[in-house]
Image (cartoon, rainbow, N blue to C red):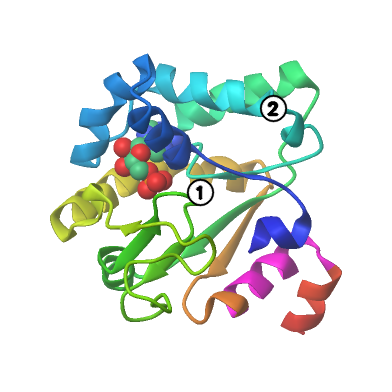
Amino acid sequence: MLGERIHAPQIASGDLLREAVRDNTPVGIQARSYMDKGSLVPDELVLKLIDARLDQPDAKSGFILDGFPRSVPQAEALAGMLKDRGERISKVVAINVPEDELVKRISGRRTCRNCNEMYHVVFDPPAKPGICNKCGGELYQREDDDEATVRHRLQVYNNATKPLLDYYGKAGLLSQVDGVGPSEEVLHRILAKIGDGAGAKAAS
Ligand code: AMP
C-alpha cells in the first residue's frame, strides 16, 4: 500500500531470499536452513541480493526497504552501498506492534505463491478460500510462520534488530509508528511521518 502511494518499489529481503530458495540459486541453497529455523541468513548472502536489486532500473529513483537492514552490521553495509551510488536514506520507520498481536497476525497469514499478496484467515480472508483475489494464485502458509518459529524470530528481532532503533535514532532518521489498528490507518500514520501531504491531513 505504501509503495503504491509513494510510487516506490518495495524491496523486501525476505521476498528476495524466498525467490532465491524457490529458484534453487546458490544463495537460496545456502539460505534455506537459516530461514526454516527463523534465524538470520548470513550477511554476505543477503547483501549480495540487495546490492543486485538496487541495480534494477525501478530502484533508480527511490525505494522502500522492508526487513533490511536487520542488524547494525547490515546497516553499516547499506550505508556503504548507498554512498557508492550517491544515495542516502531519507527516513526509517519502525512499526510497533505488541508481540502477542504479532503472533496472531503471522500465524494466520497466508501468502500468494505468485504475487506475494498477503491475507489473514480471520482478519483479511480472500473471497475464495486458498485463492488470491488479485491474481488467482495459490495461497500458502510460510513454513516459518508457525508459532514456535515466530517466537524465535521475535527473539532474533530483540537481539539483533532492536539496536537499530538506537542506531537510526542517533542519526536523526527514525520515526516510530503505532502499528495497531486497520492497515489504512497505519498507512496514514506512516505517511504523516514521512511527509506525504495526504497522510499529514489524515493524521491531523
Ligand atoms: P521476512 O520475510 O522478512 O519475515 O524474512 C523471512 C526470513 O528470511 C527471516 O526469518 C530470515 O531467515 C531471512 N531474512 C530476511 N531478511 C533478512 C535480513 N535482512 N538478514 C538476514 N536474514 C533475513
Left or right of residue 179, residue 10 in this image: right
Occupied quadrant, residue 88: top right
Q: Which residue is mark 1?
A: 165
Give the farthest residue toward the front: 136
For residue 42, which quarter of the picture?
A: top left
Mark 2 residue element: loop
**Most foreground residue, 78 or 121:** 121
- In which quadrant will I find the C terminus? bottom right
Which kind of residue does numbered mark 1 sit on? Leu
Q: Is residue 66 magenta?
A: no
Number of residues whose C-alpha sits closer than 10 Å to that of mark 2, classed few (under 14), some (14–19) or many (20 or more): few
Separation of marks 1 and 2 at Cα, in angstroms: 28 Å
Q: Residue at x 38, y 66 (%)?
A: 131
* In the displayed structure image, the side of residue 135 where residue 35 appears, left or right: left
User: Which marked residue is nearer to the observer: mark 1 or mark 2?
Assistant: 2
- From what the image shows, is residue 25 above or below residue 35? above
Residue drawn at point x = 51 percent, y = 62 percent: 95
Please name whichever residue, 195 or 18, is drawn nearer the observer in this view of the structure. Answer: 18
Looking at the image, residue 169 lies above or below residue 49 = below
Nearest the viewer among 173 and 197 is 197
Q: Picture quarter containing residue 76?
A: top right
Q: Report the number of discs.
A: 2
Segment colored magenta: 185-196
Q: Position of residue 144 (x, y in %)?
A: 24, 48
- Res. 162 in view: no
Q: Residue at x 40, y 43 (%)?
A: 161
What residue would you read off at disc 2? 56
Q: Main secondary structure of the magenta part?
A: helix
> Residue 177: x, y in percent?
57, 67
- Amino acid type of the residue tagged 2 in the rendering: Gln
N-terminal label among 1 and 2: 2
